[in-house]
Image (cartoon, rainbow, N blue to C red):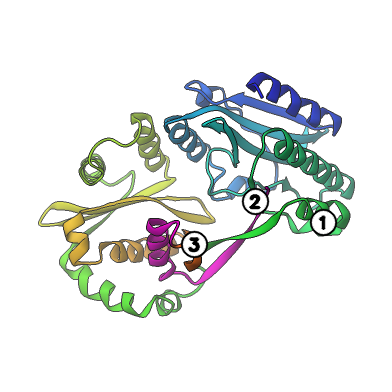
Amino acid sequence: MEVNSLIQNLQIIAKKKSFLTLINKVDESFIKKSKKLNFENNSYLNNGPFNDKDWINYSYERLRCRPGISNILDVRFFFQQNKKILSLFEFTIYKKKNKFYIISRGTELNPFVPYLKNSTPKIILKKTLDLLVEVNSFLKSNLKIKKILFNFPIMFNSINNKYNYLIKSSEKTLTNLWSIIDLSLPLENIKSNFRKSYKSVVNDNKKIYDINLVEKDNILFDKMWKKYRNLHFKEAGGLTRSEKTWDIQKNMIIKKKAFLIIILKNKIEVAAAFVFFNKNFGFYFSGAFDTIEKNTTSLNHICQYKIIEYLKKKNIKCYLLGEYIKKKDSIKKKKLFEISYHKFGFATDLLNQTALKYK
């Protein structure tokens, strides 16, 4: 299906259900033309981990630069009454090697979530679920989408027939798990949940390093940012992403949406971690570690502990460590499993998400 035809079909589906649409092709000008939708009093939309504009722009820039990716569409459906948005959901469609894929606004980390107010009338809930069912059916039938990651609002349970149909229409319902840290717990309780082998590693090794927390107001900000880039370049064996993504990340720190952890040994950078946050969530965005030093000491453990300390100090509620890969999937995802296993050693809880898989 051609992109223009795809856009027209999605607009027709939305119009039939009395929803409005904003559908944009994601190209170099997308960041400038992307429009913010104001959705009052919705804490998840305004303060969710992946709904920040800079995060979305970064994610789209990464996606746009990946080999073989084309026809990226940013799709947004919303129901408006008296100039107020009562229901909204949004996602990304892109093409790779003649196959279509669906993710949530630039990143596979965020589930396909309908945003609704707690006071949303039942008739609007029904309209939203009707639209979800029809969009889901269209994506499955016409684009041969194989998997859609959902996070269903609990109020959908009150509209059982359509909700159950959406679940039963899939070949299989999968559970995606995330390792998280509940930052409302006292620091000692969080530490007590660490994998046993981690506790002594953190205490023994942090004494031999110079650990720096870098924010916008840090007088060494530019110097430390350069060290982060240099370490990333060295360990990755070159430049792995566009200059624009680095600019977006740097601006996140300047806008107080992110911070850096830089670890030095004898004034040389040996580890770095970039962490995105808002008032509710912290997210481990990316890191870079000196290979030789990492193999002799546990630099990542030290980084994680410093991040936890700082996020607690900022009164942030939850630290998202990353996806939890089950052991039975470890053969197909060996590297991801190793990263996941390491992060799970810090977790206090697992967060569930639902994925619908199709033949």
Mark 3 and mark 2: span between their CA atoms?
34 Å
> Could you tell whether 70 is left or right of 117 in the image?
left
Give amino acid for label 1: Asn
Region rendered in magenta = 331-359
Front residue (pair 148, 319): 148
- The residue singled out by tag 1 in the image is 164
Tag of residue 329: 3
Tag of residue 43: 2
Residue under the image location 38 percent in, 60 percent down: 339
Determine crowd level at label 2: few under 14, some 14-19, many 20+ residues with C-alpha closer than 10 A: few
Element marked by disc 3: helix
Residue under the image location 64 percent in, 21 percent down: 2
Query: From this viewpoint, is residue 209 visible?
Result: yes
> Could you tell whether 244 is left or right of 223 in the image?
right
Determine crowd level at label 3: few under 14, some 14-19, many 20+ residues with C-alpha closer than 10 A: few
Q: Position of residue 171 (x, y in %)?
A: 71, 53
Residue under the image location 33 percent in, 30 percent down: 243
